[in-house]
Image: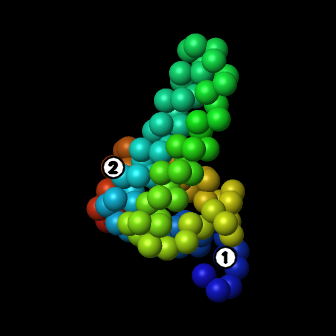
Amino acid sequence: MSERIKTYDEFYEFYLSEHKKLGTRVFHFLGILFVFLVIGFVIFTGKERFLWYIPIFGYGFAWLSHAFIERNKPATFKYPLWSLLSDFKLFFELLIGKQKFNGKQS
């Protein structure tokens, strides 16, 4: 990733190449799932003080997987918006089966 990526499609291909391992995809999926659960909890209970859990789950799970499983640097540092968007895109693609947890596409 020495030169700057110019389009989101190029970035998403790069993003997927940095998220090949089963553990990385599971950790990202769980992180985003917990983000949705926290949002639902806050909406249901009105306890906004729990919103600070969102970045802990969203980034914490992902960054741990990059450090200990994938062993690469998260794209968040260079492409924060595209990386965040891709986390959610991968979550939904895993959910509907377009992507597989083992890193293979359908």
- Pointer 1 or 2: first along the chain: 1
The structure residue drawn at horizontal position 64% and vertical position 31%, both measured from the top left corner, is 51
Residue 101 image point, x, y percent? 32, 56
Q: Amino acid at mark 2?
A: Gly
- Mark 2: which secondary structure? loop
Mark number, residue 84: none
Residue 45 versus residue 25 in the image, above or below:
above
User: Which of the 4 image quarters holds residue 5?
Assistant: bottom right
Residues at discs 1 and 2 in contact (Cβ within 8 Å)? no
The structure residue drawn at horizontal position 64% and vertical position 14%, both measured from the top left corner, is 46
Tag 1 residue: 5
Q: Amino acid at mark 1?
A: Ile
Query: Do we see residue 59 in this rendering?
Result: yes
What is the C-alpha distance between the residues marked 1 and 2?
A: 27 Å
Mark number, residue 97: 2
> Relative to residue 94, is residue 53 drawn left or right?
right
Query: Do we see residue 91 in this rendering?
Result: no
Residue 66 image point, x, y percent? 47, 65
Q: Quadrant of the N terminus?
A: bottom right
The structure residue drawn at horizontal position 50% and vertical position 55%, both measured from the top left corner, is 62
User: Which of the 4 image quarters holds residue 81?
Assistant: bottom right
- Mark 1: which secondary structure? loop
Residue 83 image point, x, y percent? 61, 59
Q: Quadrant of the C terminus?
A: bottom left
